[in-house]
Image (cartoon, rainbow, N blue to C red):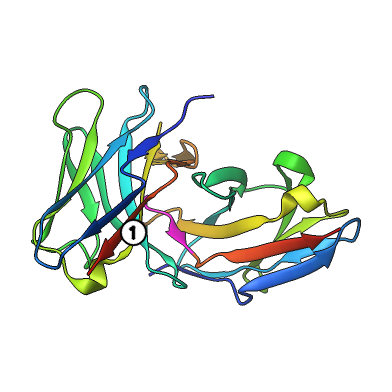
Amino acid sequence: EPEVTQTPSHQVTQMGQEVILRCVPISNHLYFYWYRQILGQKVEFLVSFYNNEISEKSEIFDDQFSVERPDGSNFTLKIRSTKLEDSAMYFCASSKTGGEVQGGIVAGANVLTFGAGSRLTVL
Amino acid sequence: AQSVAQPEDQVNVAEGNPLTVKCTYSVSGNPYLFWYVQYPNRGLQFLLKYITGDNLVKGSYGFEAEFNKSQTSFHLKKPSALVSDSALYFCAVRDWGGSYIPTFGRGTSLIVHP
């Protein structure tokens, strides 16, 4: 079964350092997402990417964050200057569709396939 | 705005007993509802979804969920729990007419005791 792979599985960094988290989505998927989960809290949406550009982002996704799809396979999340509160598990996901409603017909709910996550610890 | 609440951090059940993991949601329109499961060191895996139609939805591994519009709930159920069902369970919602981004809950840890 196709998988979303994420690297690294765990990264420890000093506050103020730049971090890049990498993801390889499923090859025929068109929508890509980053979520994060701070320990004990809910899984929070960060950003979605479609057609080589950001399609939606949350308030968390400020100027310190950026995403790229540098080639046909990788999807990266960069945090320019990490803060203590960035410590979390970061999940990458992809989906074949966005589940749009087209002409009044539901095109299909977008089922996401997630990677195992990258745990980021900022000291 | 859309939101999901999973009121229990942890659910404990004995093997062979029925299990329920609770989820309530809030959307301004009609909901898409999802359940995902996460096993240790794995990504979240899709279990089942509700779009429209029958309120009882069947999914993978013998799980089912019941959509209750009046109570805005989508509880996950299984008639007979297995030790291997022990995992983290996430409920998610998105609004038909709103953003296509699903909103997730914080997860409920299910522990099935032998």
Q: Residue at x 18, y 45 (%)?
A: A54
Q: Nearer the viewer, residue B98 or A110?
A: A110
Taking the image as drawn, is residue B73 in sight?
yes
Q: Residue at x 49, y 37 (%)?
A: A108
Q: Is residue B102 magenta?
A: yes
Q: Nearer the viewer, residue A52 or B86?
A: B86
Which quarter of the rendered picture does the N terminus of chain A lie within? Answer: top right
A58 is higher (above) or lower (below) than B61 = below
A58 is higher (above) or lower (below) than B82 = below
Q: Is residue B47 left or right of residue B84?
A: left
Q: Residue at x 40, y 31 (%)?
A: A96
Q: Nearer the viewer, residue A116 or B66?
A: A116
Give the percent coordinates (x, y) of residue A75. 24, 36
Give the percent coordinates (x, y) of residue B90. 56, 58
Q: Is residue B74 magenta?
A: no
Label total for image? 1
Which quarter of the rendered picture does the C terminus of chain A lie within? Answer: bottom left
Q: Is residue B111 left or right of residue A59?
A: right
**SS category of the residue bearing label 1:** strand
Q: Which residues are magenta?
A: B100-104
The residue identified by callout 1 is A45
